Amino acid sequence: MTLHTRHAVAADLAESRRSRPESPVQRVVSAEAATLAATRGARRRRERRIVIVLAAALLVVAALSLSAGSYSVSVPDLLRTLAGQGTGAENFIVLTLRLPRLVLALLTGLAFALSGALFQTVLRNPLASPDIVGVTGGASAAAVLGMLVLGFGSLATAFAAFGGAILVATVIYLLAWRGRGGGTGGVAGYRFVLIGVGVAFMVQGLLGYLLSRAELRDAQDALTWLVGSVSGAAWPEIAVVAVGLAVLLPIVWMLAPRLRALQLGDDLATSLGVGAERNRLGLLIVAVALAALGTAMVGPLAFVAFVSAPIARRLVGTGGLSLVPSALVGALIVSAADFASQHLLPGGLQLPAGVVTGAIGAPYLLWLLATRAAGGSTGGTGGSARGIPRDSTEGTR
């Protein structure tokens, strides 16, 4: 049979299949597939619209942060300065003082937000955030220990904070591990959160001891760092954060499909060929690294990791991962909080950005607990915020 004849036969078979009437079962399956495709398309379009709105809001906050202040810069002058054609004073104000602070706020907000989104999704618990379970607390304790006892400088303090977060997260994971027969086992979300909260209290006790034993001036410097602030940002620090994100973000992108499978539960994820515990450990390592990176650079900005992903999921409203909207919300919270702490407080008062993020996050935590109590939930800390399935597998691990 020649090649032309084979193509002719294949075309005849395809035409025969198209002309053959579908069975009722095939029509139902086709209708469901079309409905599912339409639903997915609508979700993607809604998420894209939310991303555009958040990006526009970030642009507005960035313009305000760069132009407002004791030395105001108009928008045309700002654009001219960013293009490298500003005066000496404009270059110093915008490029040396304000732009590094804004860029550091955006990058660390992104890191904290993605860390919180990964923690909450992997552990399937809305309270599972690095600043709730003690990961950033471990970074804080290590940094304060370095500053007050070991006499570390800023760079060594950042490395100490990074190491402290990794160490505390490792301890929490090992304590939350529950083995099963045959050398297998895993970590349940509710155990990780409960142990993490306990470790956070222990870390707070260590911080209190270190501060009470320190000289007054040293204790004041340590307390300023503990509040969290992006003031004093410098390009070398920004380069460190940028390099860290350049390494971690592709890993998040590669692991995102596995994260979606874990949202369905361990059993279903395993049936789809996704090793639940192995992928959970890998995602937790990335989440801890993101939180450690942000904390090492700007201190423990309170509640940014905790509130960013839930806000993004509520805006998108599709129940998906919403990692990009979460990252944008985190960047928007930190940059807006830093702008508010500089320019919007009464009496010209200026405070670290961590004070403002704490003022936003604490009421949200109370609201979350109040609404869960009103809903009559009895699942302990294993709740189900929108987009975060309830932790229903703890009994199987």
Image: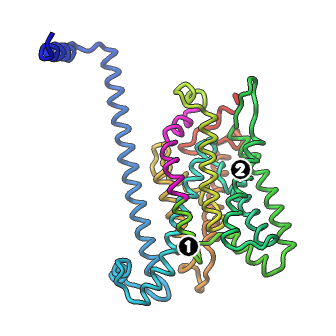
Q: Which mark is residue 138?
A: none
Q: Is residue 214 above or below residue 395?
A: below
- N-terminal-most mark, 2 or 1: 2
Q: Split into 4 quadrants, where in the image is the N terminus? A: top left
Q: Amino acid at mark 1?
A: Asp
> Measuring 71% from the left and 60% from the top, which residue is drawn there?
139
Q: Looking at the image, which residue sits at the far front?
A: 2
Q: Residue 248: within the magenta?
A: yes
What's the distance in space between the residues labelled 2 and 1, CA to CA? 28 Å
Q: Is residue 147 above or below residue 327?
A: below
**Label 2 neighbour load within 10 Å: few <14, some 14-19, many 20+:** many
- The residue lying toward the viewer, choosing from 8 and 340, is 8
- The residue lying toward the viewer, choosing from 1 and 394, is 1
> Measuring 63% from the left and 47% from the top, which residue is drawn there?
285
> Measuring 41% from the left and 54% from the top, which residue is drawn there?
50
**Label 1 neighbour load within 10 Å: few <14, some 14-19, many 20+:** many
Tell whether 356 sits left or right of 91: right
Q: Which residue in the protein does label 2 denote?
A: 169
Q: Are marks 2 and 1 in contact (CB under 8 Å)?
A: no
How far from the left and from the top, in percent, is residue 64? 44, 76
How far from the left and from the top, in percent, is residue 11? 16, 17
Residue range in magenta is 244-265
How far from the left and from the top, in percent, is residue 59? 41, 68
Q: Amino acid at mark 2?
A: Ala
Magenta part, dominant SS:
helix
Q: Split into 4 quadrants, where in the image is the C terminus? A: top right
Q: Which residue in the protein does label 1 denote?
A: 338
How far from the left and from the top, in percent, is residue 163? 70, 58
